[in-house]
Image: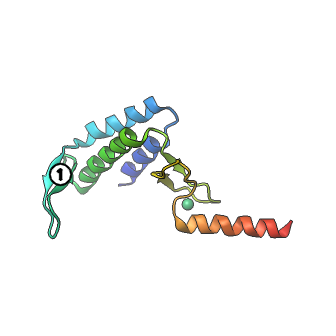
């Protein structure tokens, strides 16, 4: 799973769109992502992209790789970033209308705003 997380991070933060596409495509091939309709309990049929390998990590790898490909296709290659909060290394997917996201989540957004406020009050 740690290896998959590293692959995802490298694909998300690739500097050039061609490198990002190559990494995502390599993950799709590696994990053998295949679309199929599944009916989970209490849900209507919906699309899965599990990898073709037998392990949970391979299944997740196929899902994640395909999800990244769909985001790049629908939103463009520059919708991923590393959180701007101090000492946070999380990456995020920016699906905002104007591509304005800076932080990984509400906790880091709040921490950064509080730090900025304190910084302004001290000067
Ligand atoms: Zn963060």
Query: Which residue is disc 1 drawn over?
Result: 54
Q: For the N terminus, which image quadrant?
A: bottom left
Residue positioned most to the right: 123
Q: Residues within 10 Å of mark 1 (few under 14, many from 20)?
A: few
Cβ of mark 1 under 8 Å from ligand 1: the answer is no
At a point 18% along the width and 45% down the height, the residue shown is: 35
Secondary structure found at label 1: loop
Residue positioned most to the top: 18
Q: Is 43 left or right of 10, judged from the image as shown?
A: left
At a point 38% along the width and 32% down the height, the residue shown is: 22
Q: Position of residue 93 (x, y in %)?
A: 46, 51
Relative to 102, say whether 13 is above or below: above
- Image quadrant in which you'd find residue 39: bottom left
Q: Position of residue 119 (x, y in %)?
A: 78, 66
Q: Position of residue 109 (x, y in %)?
A: 59, 64
Residue positioned most to the front: 97
Of the pair 16 and 32, the residue shown nearer to us? 16
Relative to 108, say whether 55 is above or below: above
Relative to 7, say whether 113 is above or below: below
At a point 48% along the width and 46% down the height, the residue shown is: 80
At a point 15% along the width and 64% down the height, the residue shown is: 40
Q: Position of residue 61 (x, y in %)?
A: 30, 49
Relative to 80, say whether 22 is above or below: above
């Amino acid at each position: 799973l740690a290896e998959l997380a590293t692959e995802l991070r490298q694909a998300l933060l690739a500097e050039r769109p061609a490198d990002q596409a190559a990494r995502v495509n390599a993950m799709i091939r590696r994990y053998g992502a295949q679309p199929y309709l599944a009916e989970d309990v209490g849900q209507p049929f919906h699309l899965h992209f599990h990898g073709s390998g037998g392990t949970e990590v391979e299944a997740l790898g196929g899902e994640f790789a395909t999800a990244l490909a769909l985001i790049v296709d629908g939103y463009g290659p520059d919708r991923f970033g590393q959180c701007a909060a101090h000492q946070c290394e999380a990456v995020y997917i920016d699906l905002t209308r104007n591509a304005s996201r800076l932080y990984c989540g509400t906790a880091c957004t709040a921490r950064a705003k509080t730090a900025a406020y304190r910084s302004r009050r001290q000067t």
